[in-house]
Amino acid sequence: MFQLCRPRGGRALLGLRLLRGAPRAARPVSYRPLRKVLVANRGEVSPMSPMSPGEIAIRVFRACTELGIRTVAVYSEQDTGQMHRQKADEAYLVGRGLPPVQAYLHIPDIIRVAQENEVDAIHPGYGFLSERADFAQACLDAGVRFVGPRPEVVRKMGDKVEARAIAIAAGVPVVPGTPSPVSALAEAQEFATRVGFPVILKAAHGGGGRGMRVVRAPQELEENFSRATSEALAAFGNGDLFVEKFIERPRHIEVQILGDSHGNVVHLYERDCSVQRRHQKVVEIAPAARLPPELRARLADDAVRLARQVGYENAGTVEFLVDQSGDYYFIEVNSRLQVEHTVTEEITDVDLVHAQLQVTAGRSLPELGLQQERIRVNGCAIQCRVTTEDPARGFQPDTGRIEVFRSGEGMGIRLDGASAFQGALISPHYDSLLVKVVAHGPDQPAAFRIRGVKTNIPFLQNVLAHPQFLSGAADTQFIDENPELFHLRPGQNRAQKLLHYLGHVMVNGPSTPLPVKAKAALVEPTPGAPPAGLRAVLQREGPGGFARALRGHRGLLLTDTTFRDAHQSLLATRVRTRDLARIAPFVSHALSPLCSMETWGGATFDVAMRFLHECPWERLRELRRLVPNIPFQMLLRGANAVGYTNYPDNVVHRFCEVAVANGMDIFRVFDALNYVPNLLLGVEAAGSAGAVVEAALSYTGDVADPARTKYSLEYYLGLARELVAAGTHVLCIKDMAGLLTPAAARLLVGALREQHPEVPLHVHTHDTAGAGVASMLAAAQAGADVVDVAVDAMSGMTSQPSMGAVVACARGTPLDTGIDLQRVFEYSEYWEAARGLYAAFDCTATMKSGNADVYENEIPGGQYTNLHFQAHAMGLGHKFKEVKKAYTEANKLLGDLIKVTPTSKVVGDLAQFMVQNGLSREEVEARADELSFPMSVVEFLQGHIGVPPGGFPEPFRSKVLKDLPRVEGRPGASLPPLDFEALGRELGARHGAPPSPEELLSAALYPKVYDEFHSFRSTFGPVACLGTRLFLEGPAIAEEFEVELEQGKTLHIKALTHGPGAGQREVFFELNGQLRSILVRETQALKEMHVHPKAEKGAKGQVGAPMPGEVVEVRVKEGTTVAKGDPLCVLSAMKMETVVTAPVGGKVTKVHVRPGLSLEGEDLIAVIE
């Protein structure tokens, strides 16, 4: 006698084993061996997802091959490259010209293929064809055997009403329900009233969750009845419904049955399919846990009795609901093989597909050794369906190409799949099933890595680890009642994301070419802990004790700005954390006498996210870890925190608290207008966070010139008195433009020292004119305790004075800094090489030296560099001399401002606007009511920054603003507190995980920049791991390099090549010895060619762009009536936004721009008649 079996620990070869003892039974007359079998599907057809990717077809092919049966596949036009077609001995196209799903459901074509190719039998797979009586009948009519029950049995079991009647006749308990389908709402209402709510509506002619609704109250019935009817009609062609009493919190238990044409029926025990989502099974277990033996026996006996009642042949499943009290109810019969048949095979050692084929050939179950008493349960098995669905987005199916596929392996692990391989294309046409993972025995489920498409693996991991699931107590409400299952732990996928970034740069090129290829000098780390520094005093004695220590220190203290303001001034703030971190331990050991290091704040915060794709908070924490002994200092823009606008007060306070928690020690608080209310907010916020408060006097003018009366010595002394009274620990002179001459330094510092003998004085300047070292030494001699310097290779020009020069000049004098000059040279050597990595951003690309004309134009150091870049970018490089002169005139137009971010930007924007449009100061004043000024100028005049000393310039302000609203008093005072909890919920919903306190603040300060940063990091991963050259320009073809993801985990990458393409290219890498390829969009090829018309000079109604830029917003459309001065659109260029207004009143007859369009100067925006 033969028995169908699955050998333990290996794959079945023939699936047959000769049983010793009993004599071999005679072959029945009806036995006809199968020589060729066609599988009429590529995979599962389900109402929720039309078809799975070939998994069942390949499963049947494997069984046929083991039994020596030739296999035939059918495929649609869209599936020429699919795996199921390749695995079959023969493959034929069906449904030519039809959509992919309809092709596999085209019965005449499938029958034609079978007849033309001498097919003996058709296996319908899992899909709808397996439960279509007309398909089973069509097979028989064509003389082809159907691997499944007889057509009349398929019809009876597919009709829920008739199946219910058969169950009642067989004595199997059923859920109270309507005796026949209902099509009218009144019938459903009558039944629900009689049996009570809740009830469930089910499609009478199909399953899979379509047309199924739970109704818990009378008022919900009409709407749900309508929706269920509509779904059933769309899915099955018939909208009739079956109404049943809804069983609360049941378990879904199904019994596997197997029958033959000789009247034999056996069961292969049960499966627990209770873990469901929207009536779709997610995890299946065999046997069911915590099922009493007597209940298990009754379920099995009723399933067999029901099958015998209809003369069931082949494989099928009888499904039950088991309620909390142990009562059970018949639901339906699935007259086909189920997706979850694998777990039954694992625990019974019976190959169900072999059995299906042998029964179809005419074998009896006893002949196959499948007698009930011989079928035993061996261990337990669990199946998870790995799909390309994203649980974070409501299980939305994902499509694309699988870039990486690594499956779990080991004892007791079985994988059934078809599309789960590297390079597989996941189509939107079919079910999202990738692979079924089956674990048998005590082992945990396998671990998988799949890249390129989203999967449900994180969700499955949560399900498998949940205590309720582990205890065997999961019911059909398990997923709905445990929302924590959707708190997904995202996979890191770091290597593949980095390959995507490198491929993107290789294909699309860097944003800025890098003419210099240099490598930073390696600085050997100094072993051991660094020497104690002033941070120990701060930690021991607090801010007050730290301030006393500064005043009591003998010699001159230095603050090193190399880590922030120096590279902000010289290299457009582009220095990456990686290059800072490489030298940080050296500074910690060699420069421990420093007063502080300026490491953070100012423009570095948003630039880190915006351009470097780094988290600024991670930078702060990493540097703090590497430099534990030297105090860190940052720049706080008063009420603007580290932004360019006003924020609610609670945002500024929260920012300071979190910055201190991440390692910040000293806050240099300044305001662009020296506006005391804004300054006081910053002082209070930093002080309440427990930090050292260093309030700054923003310096402009010349206190040594008696003719300069607006910003006089008395002005600064009066401001200092207010700040000291407010509780500042340190007073700072913040000389943004390098205007503090040695004479002015002696005068101002001397007066402040006399007025505030106990308060430490700290002086900051820029070396644009070349007099910075002299001014700092003069300040120190007049009583300054601390001065700002930058290491030699990062000093001079628009940066700070040279550290080496100050150390050398002070050596051996009462101002001796205590710093070893030789170590400064070593420090500088590193930065000389590192600076070369950023040559594309170096100010020396457009300017070769500083210039003493800064004493006339008063342009701040950092802005001087940016203004030079902007002038070149806007085609004004040859007119930079004019821009500097216009800066002076613009400053006068605005009332002689203190120029530091953001007021310096206001002056700079107005200066470039004047040069671009050829306007003099007098012309701007005369035409102020009709010109389209940069938005920064308009907002300044409205009062969004604060009130300047001496008030706003009139009548210029009134002419520009006209009827625009004005802000009175401190701009942030009227802002309501930010609801951080609401913002956290919003970010959590948007990004799939609750934000950290740091992420919350990044989003509060820079909402758009943070979203773009988060999106970039999700797409391209931790690019901070890449070397700076690789980050900026990508690797060369055939270049090999290493990327350290973390300690002990290093990637070895070789860039191989990239192919041609129109709009998309395939880029090839070798990653740790394995070939990887990615697809990259070619952005240049996707750009549209656009030739834009120009505004005609002298044509009064033609509005041209006042400057080159990108259209951010269009505020009118054709037909709009506008008055003179009404806004038409908003342009943005190099961080400068300009509102273009109507020069005349009239009707807009043509709009030539749209958001995102790049314009040149005088490009036509609109025509007004």
Image (cartoon, rainbow, N blue to C red):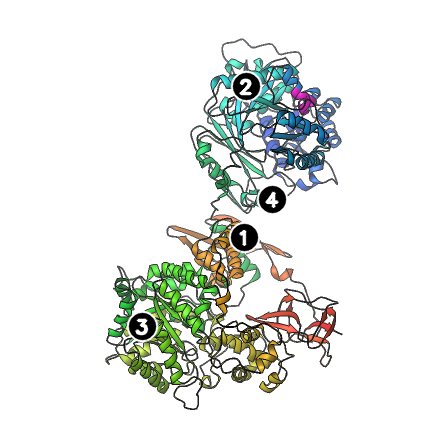
Q: Residue at x 39, y 71 (%)?
A: 832
Q: Distance from label 1 to label 4 (Cα)?
A: 17 Å
- Left or right of 22 in this view: 619: left
Q: Write down the residue under mark 2.
A: 299
Q: Distance from label 2 to label 1 (Cα)?
A: 56 Å
629 shown above or below 1064: below
Magenta region includes residue 163: yes
Q: Write down the residue under mark 3.
A: 824
Q: Residue at x 44, y 64 (%)?
A: 652
Stretch in magenta: 154-164
Residue type at the position of mark 3: Val
Residue type at the position of mark 4: Leu
Q: Distance from label 3 to label 2 (Cα)?
A: 84 Å
In this view, which residue lies farthest toward the top?
A: 23
Residue type at the position of mark 2: Leu
Q: Write down the residue under mark 1.
A: 1068
Q: Distance from label 3 to label 1 (Cα)?
A: 44 Å
